[in-house]
Each structure stands twice: as C-alpha cells, then as structure tokens.
Image (tube, rainbow, N blue to C red):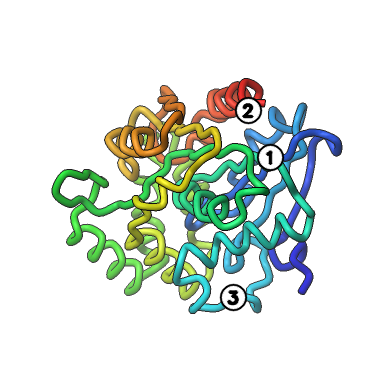
Amino acid sequence: MDIRHRNNVTMTGRADGPVVLLAHGFGCDQNMWRMVVPALAEEYRVVLFDYVGSGRSDASAWSEQRYSSLAGYAQDVLDVCQELDLRDVAFVGHSVSAMVGVLAAAKEPERFSRLVMVAPSPRYIDEDGYRGGFSAEDINELLESLDSNYLGWSAAMAPVIMGNPDRPELGAELTASFCAADPDKARVFASTTFLTDSRADLRTVTVPTLVLECAHDVIAPREVGAYVHAAIPGSRLVTLNATGHCPQLSAPEATAQAITAFLGGSR
C-alpha cells in the first residue's frame, strides 16, 4: 500500500533538519497546522499527514474496526514513520492526537525523541477525583446529537470548541472542516475520542514532553493539563495566553514559539 497517498503525506522545511511530525485532531486535517508550519520549517523537516478518514486521505482504506480504537490512529503514525524511515522524531499532536502520540511512542519508542501535547486530554469524562470537563451524560448527549444530525452538530459545536467568539472567522473555519468530513467516519472518530480513557498510558512516556495548554479551553480545561503534567515525570507545562481548543489557529505565533523553544532546548 502507498502510505504517502493513503495518508496524504506532505513535507516541507529543511531536508536535513530534525524531524517534526504534526498530527491533527478530530474533525480536522493537516491544514489546521498551516499557520505554525512556516516558523517550524525554518529549522526543521516538517512532516504532515491526514489520518485515514480525514482530509485528503484515501477513504477506501478506512475500516471501522481499525479506527474504533486510538491504536488504529497510532498505527497510521507508525506507518508514516516506517514509510519515510523517520527516526529521532519530535511528535506534535493536537487534542486526541496527543494521546495517539503517546501510544505510538510506547509501541516503537526507538522512533521518537520528544512529544509535544497540544491541548491534550486522556479522558473527557469526569469521575471521582478527576475532572475531564464533561459528565457522562454530556458526552452521551453530544454523541447522540452528532449521530442524529452531524451537520447541525458541527455548526453548533465547532464555534464552541474554537472559542474566540469575537473572531467568528475561526469558528467558521472549524465548522467548514467538520462539515467536510464524512459523517459516518466522523461518528466513529468522535466516539473513539470522547469515550476513551488513556490515563494509564501516560505512565509509559519516557521522552522529554511538553504539555501545551490554553488559558481558557472548554474541551480540555486547565485541570486536565495539570493532570497530564503531573502524570508524566519531568514534563514541562506551558499555558498559552489563548482561548479555545485550537491554539495553532487562534494563537499561532505563541504556539510556534512554545514548540520551537521546547524542541531547541531539548536537543
């Protein structure tokens, strides 16, 4: 199988530079990184891709069985790494992809040198002693709404996820990204994202890790960032003066600066 075609792999930046692999979150594709790529490309070899079922990936390669688990998305990451023979990779994962990176690094640790977790959450549902930001009822209602009217759900939820109501163009972009996704595949990705509990996997992280959170994020509140930071020994927690769940769009300069400062300091 042609992995480059399957996952719409693109590369930019310095051909001889250290590798940075950027992974998008639910409802998005690699285009969500476009505003931070130029800063990274000055020093790094930047690799981007779309998960199967997202963006311009080969939709015929999608399997509900594979992508009903975060392990399926982690395998996409590893397939790209194997296809390009990537080593010493700095993996940058947004939202659910932060945990996908944790799984990929646990399976093939020799390929990864650093993790950057942008607005991560290992579990979205609250339980005693843990605040994920949502009750089980909230998540069930969210998934039921998505299942019954995906386009309506996208139009309502994307601006909430993005935040920044004073900048409606950002919410409109995320809405368009959500609406462009195949509803059946998006439902599976949503369930995989919002129902997974990956907290135990945080203990497997052994590489230098940056936890990058936003000051105001309704999807991954700061309690979650603090939890992830505490669960990964030696990790660094940086709070961006940013609102919403997608700082690579709402605060791209600060996001790129935090990433490059961490990667440059950990080499």
Give the quadrant of the C terminus.
top right
Instruction: Say what amino acid the circle numbered 3 marks.
Output: Trp
Whole-angstrom CA distance, mark 2 to mark 3, is 33 Å
Q: Residue furthest left?
A: 128
Instruction: Say what amino acid the circle numbered 2 marks.
Output: Leu
Q: Which residue is mark 3?
A: 62
Q: Nearer the viewer, residue 176 or 41?
A: 41
Q: Nearer the viewer, residue 43 or 101?
A: 101
Q: Is residue 205 visible?
A: yes
Q: Nearer the viewer, residue 216 or 125?
A: 125
Q: Position of residue 13 (x, y in %)?
A: 79, 36
Would you say 36 lies left or right of 255 here?
Answer: right
Mark 1 or mark 3: which comes first in sequence?
A: 1
Mark 2 or mark 3: which comes first in sequence?
A: 3
Q: Nearer the viewer, residue 33 or 233?
A: 233
At horizontal 60% and vertical 61% (from top left) the residue drawn is: 51
189 over 119 or under it: above or below: below
Q: Which residue is mark 1?
A: 20
Q: Residue furthest right?
A: 15
70 over 223 or under it: above or below: below
Camera-side mark, 1 or 3 = 1
For the residues bearing labels 1 and 2, Cβ distance under 8 angstroms = yes
2 over 165 or under it: above or below: below
Whole-angstrom CA distance, mark 1 to mark 3, is 25 Å
Would you say 20 lies left or right of 253 here?
Answer: right
Residue 263 is labelled as 2
Give the quadrant of the N terminus.
bottom right
